[in-house]
Image (cartoon, helix red, strand yellow):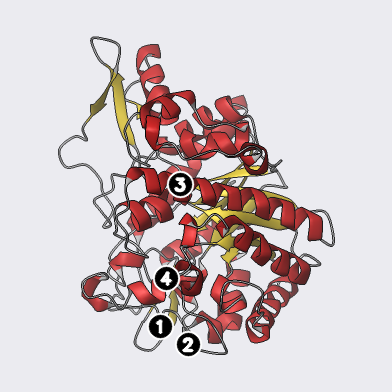
Amino acid sequence: MKNIERNKSFSKDFTWGVSTSAYQIEGAAFDDGKGRSVWDEFCGKPGAIWHGHNSDIACDHYHRYREDIALLKNLGVKAYRLSLCWPRILPDGTWRINERGMDFYDAVIDELLEAGIDPFITLFHWDYPQELYLRGGWLNPDSSHWFAEYAVKVAQRFSDRVTNWFTLNEPQCFISLGHYQGMHAPGLKLSLKESLLAGHNSLLAHGRSVQAIRENAKQPVKIGCSFATQVKIPATSSPQDVEAGRKMMLGVINRDLWNNSWWMDPVLLGKYPEDGMKLFGKDVPDIKPGDMEIIHQPVDYCGHNVYTAKRFKAGVDGNPVEVPPAAGYNITSQEDWEVVPEGMYWTLKYMSEKYDIPIMITENGHQNLDSVSLDGKVHDPQRIDYLHRHILQLKKAMDEGVDVRGYFAWTLLDNFEWSFGYRVRVGLVYTDYNTLERIPKDSFRWYRDLIASNGGNL
């Protein structure tokens, strides 16, 4: 009975939210003085995006933000994690402010606060200014200073009302997919050495932007960074497999960018991991005096974006061995990601053990091929099941002492899913891309009831 009571609900100050990104929902790609981003350019590249889709209109959130905030209010979320479009605010990337862009975000923030919703602002969710890319982008040694200038401008404008900030969203993704593998904007296939340099500069941008926000904030603020968490879990609960999962989750094993510690250790511990330094060797970027101190700024929480996981067991020689999914395994519609709810639990356990910092789950959601049924509704039981199972695993970790401060579902609206275009749907709300009608799905109502009960109906 004690266990049942303990699991009944979350603490009263737990933050329930939902996340979006500017490029995926705003549209208005050429409106009101907005500059072009690398994604605006990339969408014009033949074959880059599924069926040649683009985000010129997307969900037209730029013109329909009041309708979307009304949906957020109806959903009952306490917080909304949104990103700012850097070139909408600074069309050239630096200094010259587009006041109409600033006015837009002023209006969004005010509308959110009027609805009783706390804005959590992400400074960068991949829409890098094209003008700065032409000057070298993340490879330019001045890139972190450009980002700090941007952070100064938005902190001066919005910090009177915004207290929660994230600097970067998923540096693993925008560096690896965009600069190393060429699958995302700007579509580069740099060497590993150059990609690691771009990554180092992006981490410097994180640190400098933390400094900029704190120095220019008009009230006390809380700041974090969100990572594309690469989830590796034990195949069984045996101590040997638990250690195998830990080694894969926290180690730098392969000569690529898809790991956690290379990105998180500098931010949270002030150094690159030793195994990564040894593995990357001569490809490690030149680390100048003071770089690590800049990157290792005090932060208030760490954001993890959790979607899928891979399982590992201890091999006969003690080294981890991947365990493939069983036949007929449960997948989402994007990249055949396996649905592995336990990945949430092990993410929280492994990360809290290593870094000992409050955690926010800043993205977690299910990619599906939803459609409107004959009854005019959108039934998405797979998404409900996915969210339910993952939140149960989150609560399990919290009950074991992990400090989790909030959960942000990905995402409010079906939207532009990067190189997948509009092929998959991830929202709690269905978007008709022809009429721009919004239709709340069954999962919207499920999540609304969950929030209303503060997790009590799990």
Query: Residue at horizontal 69%, vertical 73%?
Result: 109
Closer-to-camera residue (123/321): 123
Answer with mark 1 or mark 4, whichever residue precedes in sequence.
4
Q: Amino acid at mark 3?
A: Leu
Q: Which residue is mark 2?
A: 30
The mark lying in front, picked from 3 and 1, is 3
The mark lying in front, picked from 3 and 2, is 3
Q: Give neighbour class at mark 2: few <14, some 14-19, many 20+ (Cα, 10 Å).
A: few
Tell me the number on the disc at residue 257. none
All told, the count of numbered labels is 4
Query: Residue at horizontal 74%, vertical 69%?
Result: 158
Secondary structure found at label 1: loop
Query: Residue at horizontal 62%, vertical 81%?
Result: 101
Q: Position of residue 155 (x, y in %)?
A: 74, 65
Q: Which residue is mark 1?
A: 56
Q: Give neighbour class at mark 3: few <14, some 14-19, many 20+ (Cα, 10 Å).
A: many
Residue 21 visible to the viewer: yes
Q: Which residue is mark 4?
A: 38
Contact between labelled residues 2 and 1, with CB atoms less than 8 Å apart: yes
Whole-angstrom CA distance, mark 3 to mark 1, is 31 Å
Q: Give neighbour class at mark 4: few <14, some 14-19, many 20+ (Cα, 10 Å).
A: many
Contact between labelled residues 2 and 3, with CB atoms less than 8 Å apart: no
Q: Which residue is mark 3?
A: 197
Closer-to-camera residue (296/8): 296
Relative horizontal placement of residue 426, taking residue 71 as reference (left or right):
left
Answer with mark 2 or mark 4, whichever residue precedes in sequence.
2
Q: Amino acid at mark 2?
A: Phe
The mark lying in front, picked from 1 and 4, is 4
